[in-house]
Amino acid sequence: MSAFVPAILVLADGTVFRGYGIGAEGIGVGEVVFNTSMTGYQEILTDPSYCRQIVTLTYPHVGNVGTNHEDGESSRVHASGLIIRDLPLLASNFRMNQTLPAFLNANNVVGIAGIDTRKLTRLLREKGAQNGCIVAGRIDEGEALERARSCPSMSGLDLAKVVTCDTPNQWQEGEWSLGKGFSPPKSHRFNVVAYDFGVKRNILRMLVSRGCKVTVVPARTTADDVLALKPDGVFLSNGPGDPETCDYAIRAIQQFLAIGLPTYGICLGHQLLGLASGARTIKMKFGHHGGNHPVQDLDSRRVMITSQNHGFAVDASSLPANLRVTHVSLFDGSIQGLERTDVPAFSFQGHPEASPGPHDVDYLFDRFIKLMQENAASNA
């Protein structure tokens, strides 16, 4: 598609931005959010947590390294659209297989460039995330506004069941390294069942690289079916949508907690662990999306830079006595980490598996391994 095809972004409040299309011609509708990462646009677009969302990248130049066959966090693009300031004329990288526009076209995703993303980001920060519509090609501004206003709110949406896998499967790919690609699995020390609520591939790779045999199961898998696999631990993945709608997952997690099975949750999995423990979740004004979020580990007092992608949070005022806060955001004080004081279970709101980095919080994967080791020793 030509870079000169006209495109518009219309927000539900009536604000209109005019630019040019950089992806497929057509319409994209979803909640408009902004991401402050300077790199990783391919990983962002393919992250299932962005289902039904239109991503605004605040970094001004996007697309200069193209896309490749290795950096996807899932098999396809899940974002409903992409908004950028400037598309560089040249894309150059020794790993590149496609340009960003070609990648968007191949995945039938609309994109818009040439708009003031600073103004859009300020608007989203002041008014909060809101629904929007991108139209590229034949433009009907009135229809775009109607589509933006009729788009369902994220609150009350169960999207984990939309993006999850259809059947259980074994994941056997370890982490990537330059010149070697993805590493083969090491010897399996632990049997881990990973719930796919929209899981990112690098999470599974980090588990495999630590000696885990990983079985990925659909979001609605019952606790009994998981326990039949005789896991040493259960992993609760990231994912899109409102965590309170995932009642099936909450019930399963409560069964794991009741028998003291080591459990580790990230992002949506973190929120679900909180809900299963008796806490509540809330919709944030504009969420956390980016790779530069400072978080403090309350035990070590260490401050880390983290990757974030969430629009809901565990409500700090709702925590039961057996749920302890381990990490907090230094941006707004929201809960970033939780730990059960009575059973071996913990969670983190951000993304320790960040791909690309930062990797400051990847020690939490080692903590999960230690939990399974300790649980195995106590049951020996």
Image (cartoon, rainbow, N blue to C red):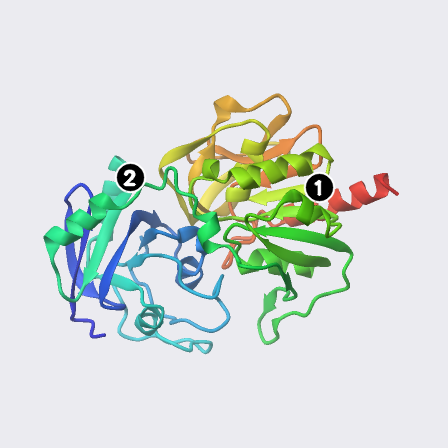
Residue 298 left/right relative to 379: left
Q: Residue 80 location, x and y as percent?
A: 32, 57
Q: Quadrant of the C terminus?
A: top right
Judged by depth in the image, the label closer to the viewer, 1 or 2, is 1
Could you tell me which residue is drawn at 70 percent across and 32 percent down? 258
Callout 2, which amino acid? Answer: Arg
The residues tagged by marks 1 and 2 sit, at their Cα atoms, a distance apart of 38 Å
Q: Which residue is under mark 2?
A: 125
Q: Which residue is under mark 1?
A: 262
Could you tell me which residue is drawn at 79 percent across and 41 percent down? 375
Q: Earlier in the sequence, mark 1 or mark 2?
A: 2
Could you tell me which residue is drawn at 72 percent across and 40 percent down? 261
Camera sees residue 348: no
Q: Quadrant of the N terminus?
A: bottom left
Q: Is residue 313 above or below residue 22?
A: above
Q: Is residue 359 above or below residue 376?
A: below
Q: Is residue 177 above or below residue 200?
A: below
Q: Residue 111 location, x and y as percent?
A: 27, 62
Q: Residue 61 location, x and y as percent?
A: 30, 62
Residue 67 left/right relative to 214: left
Q: Residue 56 location, x and y as percent?
A: 30, 53
Dividing the picture into quarters, in which one does residue 182 lie?
bottom right
Dividing the picture into quarters, in which one does residue 277 lie?
top right
Callout 1, which amino acid? Answer: Pro
